[in-house]
Each structure stands twice: as C-alpha cells, then as structure tokens.
Image (cartoon, helix red, strand yellow):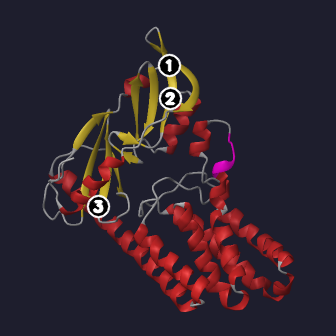
C-alpha cells in the first residue's frame, strides 16, 4: 500500500493498543513502525531489476518482523523509560503494526515475500489498488480524531470500517474471478492463465489480464455490468524476441517475478520486458531494457529501467466504465 496508508494504519493500531496509557507516543511509534518495512526501497540491491524483484523481500518477512518485535519494544522503553512496565504492551504494538503493514501489502498485486527466508516466492492476493481512499480515509479520520480530539472511540471505528472494507474487497475479488472465468469460457476466449485486480481507487471496477501462448489480453469488468459481454483486446507478447537472451539473469528473474505476465517489445533497437500486471495497455509501470540488437541478434546488457510517462487521462474513462460497459476510451 502507499506510504500514507501504512503510516496511518500503524498510527491507528498504536493508538488502539496503547493510546489511553501513553498518549501520542503510541501513535507516533505506530506510524514509524508502519512505514519501516517499506523503507527497503531505499536499499540498493545491485540493479534496477533486483531492486524491483527483491522489494518486499526480507523486510516483509513475518518471521523476521516477529523476531524483531521484542527488540523494537526494548528500544522504545529505553527511549521512554517511564513506560518500561508496559514492555509487553509495546511488544504487542510492534508485533501488530509490523506484521499488519506487511499483510496489507499482501493484498496488492505487486507480490510480497512474507515467508522469507523459508520461501522467497512473492505472494499476492490482489484485493486493493495500491491507493484506495475508501480504505485509507476511515483510518485517517479516526487517527486525526484521536490525535486532536482525544477521541479513542472514533479511532476504533475507523479501523473497524477499514477492516470491513477489506473483507468486502476480498469477497468481491472471489466473485470477480469466478465471473471472469465464466464469461471468458462463454465467449470462447482462449487463455492459459489470467489475473484480476481492482482498477485505480475503487473495488467496483476490475482489470483482468490473461495469457495465451504468444498473446495476452486485457479486459475490464464492473460490478454493474450485469450480463453485458466482455470487451476483450488481444496484444502480442513477442516471445520471439527472447531468442538468445532467455537465460539472461534479468530476464529469468522477471519471468519468475511476473508469474509469466510479461511481454517483450522492440523499441528503437532495444529489447524491453514489461510487467503486464501493473498499469494498463499501453501504459505500464514497470518496463526494463534487457538487450540491444547487434546485426539482428539480441545482445544481453545490464538491465535498465525503461522510463515511461504515465497517462492519467485514462482516469475519467475508468470512472465512466464503472457505470457503462460500452464506455469508449
């Protein structure tokens, strides 16, 4: 999730656990701990591809964060010596906030290694967009009420509403995946795998990307679509561009991390590899230059992040698409 959500979630949990006993200290430490796991983004891991695929790695391990919880609690009681008798409460706070913030990341499509180092597979349960105001706002309002009005009850209500929204989103995710499978099969759309995730800022509209051999497709489904047929658009994956670079380390890592949801492209003599899960056609977030052509043969290079410009002009269309299955981009 985004930094504001992680910060406010941590602050709200801290306030709920210790706010009545230690006041704003609980809220502040909760906010700090809530953002701590995502600070791994500032650790250089060797290359742009490594930074991409190993983000949310060791720093998001439930085992590691659980082991560190008493350490952080001890450090906090060293800073605030008068709260030493509350060590167990501080340890509960650190445990809940650190692990809770990691589990929030699990509900986005990126992928999180929550079982590192026993299993380094990035897991994802695509349920929320990375920024979702309906999840964040109740927590933010509750934290603000606790901070400025000393209203602990509103903070609890805010957390409860956001949890209820997350449960709603999980239910919608299950429903949408079932509906997508049904509609794709009814319309005879070929696929070997597909994945659905919420569109920006909402759980009413979902984007689905699917793979079939050397093609991928993109389609959208709204909870208000009813029996309307899916509008499915196919695009080439250009897998032939992998010839000669299939064992190139960045390519191998990206194939694994994206769970095969990738496409190749030739852009002015550069071979690029794109993660199809994040973004939308043709505007994707993560695209990497992995090779260059040399006399018609692809030559592996040290991977570079291919800079793209985000097209925010699609947002009005996404809003229209929620209500109208025939909305044109």
On screen, residue 285 above or below 251: below
Residue lying farthest to the top in this orientation: 295
On screen, residue 65 above or below 276: below
Circle 3 residue: 205
- Give the structural element (helix, strand or loop) at label 1: strand
The image quadrant of residue 102 is bottom right
Q: Is residue 44 magenta?
A: yes
Say if mark 3 contacts mark 1, CB within 8 Å: no
The image quadrant of residue 79 is bottom right
Q: Residues within 10 Å of mark 3 (few under 14, many from 20)?
A: many
Circle 2 residue: 289
From the top left corner, tell me how far across and down residue 173 is, in percent. 35, 65
Depth check, front residue: 7 or 294: 7
Q: Residue at x 15, y 65 (%)?
A: 226
State the CA–CA distance, disc 3 to disc 1.
Answer: 38 Å
Circle 1 residue: 292
Q: Main secondary structure of the magenta part?
A: loop
Depth check, front residue: 14 or 73: 14
In the rendering, which numbered label is found on residue 257?
none
Of the image marks 3 and 2, the number of the one nearer the N terminus = 3
State the CA–CA distance, disc 2 to disc 1.
Answer: 8 Å
From the top left corner, tell me how far across and down residue 168 is, in percent. 37, 74
In screen coordinates, is 22 left or right of 299? Answer: right
Residue lying farthest to the front in this orientation: 148
Magenta segment boundaries in residue numbering: 41-45
């Amino acid at each position: 999730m985004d930094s504001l959500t992680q910060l406010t979630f941590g602050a709200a949990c801290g306030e709920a656990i210790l706010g009545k006993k230690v006041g704003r200290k609980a809220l502040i430490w909760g906010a700090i701990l809530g953002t701590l796991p995502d600070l791994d983004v500032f650790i250089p891991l060797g290359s742009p591809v490594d930074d991409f695929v190993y983000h949310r790695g060791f720093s998001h391990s439930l085992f590691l964060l659980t082991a560190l919880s008493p350490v952080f609690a001890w450090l906090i009681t060293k800073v605030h010596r008068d709260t030493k008798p509350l060590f167990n409460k501080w340890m509960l706070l650190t445990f809940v906030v650190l692990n809770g913030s990691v589990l929030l990341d699990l509900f986005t499509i990126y992928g999180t290694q929550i079982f590192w180092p026993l299993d380094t597979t990035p897991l994802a349960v695509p349920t929320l967009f990375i920024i979702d105001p309906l999840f964040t706002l109740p927590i933010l309002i509750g934290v603000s009420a606790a901070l400025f009005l000393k209203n602990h009850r509103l903070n609890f209500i805010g957390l409860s509403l956001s949890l209820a929204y997350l449960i709603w989103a999980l239910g919608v995710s299950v429903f949408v995946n079932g509906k997508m499978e049904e509609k794709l099969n009814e319309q005879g759309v070929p696929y070997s795998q597909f994945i659905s995730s919420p569109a920006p800022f909402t759980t009413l509209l979902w984007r689905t990307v699917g793979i079939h051999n050397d093609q991928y497709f993109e389609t959208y489904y709204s909870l208000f679509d009813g029996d309307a047929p899916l509008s499915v658009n196919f695009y080439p994956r250009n897998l032939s561009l992998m010839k000669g670079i299939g064992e190139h380390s960045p390519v191998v890592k990206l194939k694994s991390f994206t769970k095969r949801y990738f496409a190749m492209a030739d852009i002015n003599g550069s071979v690029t590899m794109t993660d199809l899960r994040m973004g939308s056609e043709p505007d994707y977030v993560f695209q990497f230059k992995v090779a260059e052509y040399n006399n018609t043969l692809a030559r592996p290079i040290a991977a570079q992040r291919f800079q793209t410009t985000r097209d925010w002009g699609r947002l009005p269309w996404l809003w229209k698409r929620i209500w109208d299955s025939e909305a044109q981009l």
